Amino acid sequence: QVQLAESGGGSVQTGDSLRLSCAASGRTVSNYAMGWFRQRPGKEREFVATSNWRGENSYLADSVKGRFIIGRDSAKNTMYLQMNSLKPEDTAVYYCASRSRGFVSQYEADYDYWGQGTQITVSS
């Protein structure tokens, strides 16, 4: 069983930066793809970013391209989401997720394990 724990959420101002971490435990995740999703108030959960652990393939949603970076530290079994130039519309609960396969995906249904979520609030 895989456990995922997000950290790094909080309240910031427009233009600020935050880094979210997702620590994985229960198995070595170096062969599996990971992703970040978010659920904005009143909206469905949506894709933000995905990467495999070797960093060979990664994709970002158009809404965050140029501002967010997905990265990982395999030695720590941890995935990161560096969020720069934050906007009020980035306000959401952010979730990390893990696949049981090495291929990246932007679809929720492809992910088998989910973290509990962490709140990001961006004020104007």
Image (cartoon, rainbow, N blue to C red):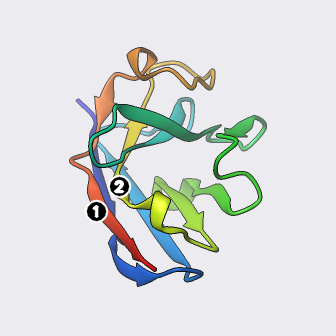
Query: In the depicted view, which residue is nearer to us: 43 or 20?
Result: 43
CA neighbours of label 1 inside 10 A, class few (<14), some (14 to 19), many (20+): some
Q: Residue at x 53, y 80 (%)?
A: 14
- Residue drawn at the location 23% of the way across and 29% of the way down: 1
Image quadrant where residue 52 sits:
top right
Q: Position of residue 113 (x, y in %)?
A: 31, 30
Looking at the rendered structure, the kind of residue marked 1 is: Gln
Where is residue 114 drawn, in percent x and y? 29, 36
Q: Amino acid at mark 2?
A: Ala
> Which residue is depicted at the point 32% across and 58% down?
6
Using the image, tell me which numbered label, if any, was put on residue 92.
2
Percent of width and height locating residue 86:
56, 71
**Neighbours of disc 2 within 10 Å: few (<14), some (14-19), many (20+):** many
Please tell me in which quadrant of the rendered image residue 75 appears: bottom right
Q: Earlier in the sequence, mark 1 or mark 2?
A: 2
**Is 105 situated above or below 11?**
above
Residue sitting at x 43%, y 39%: 28
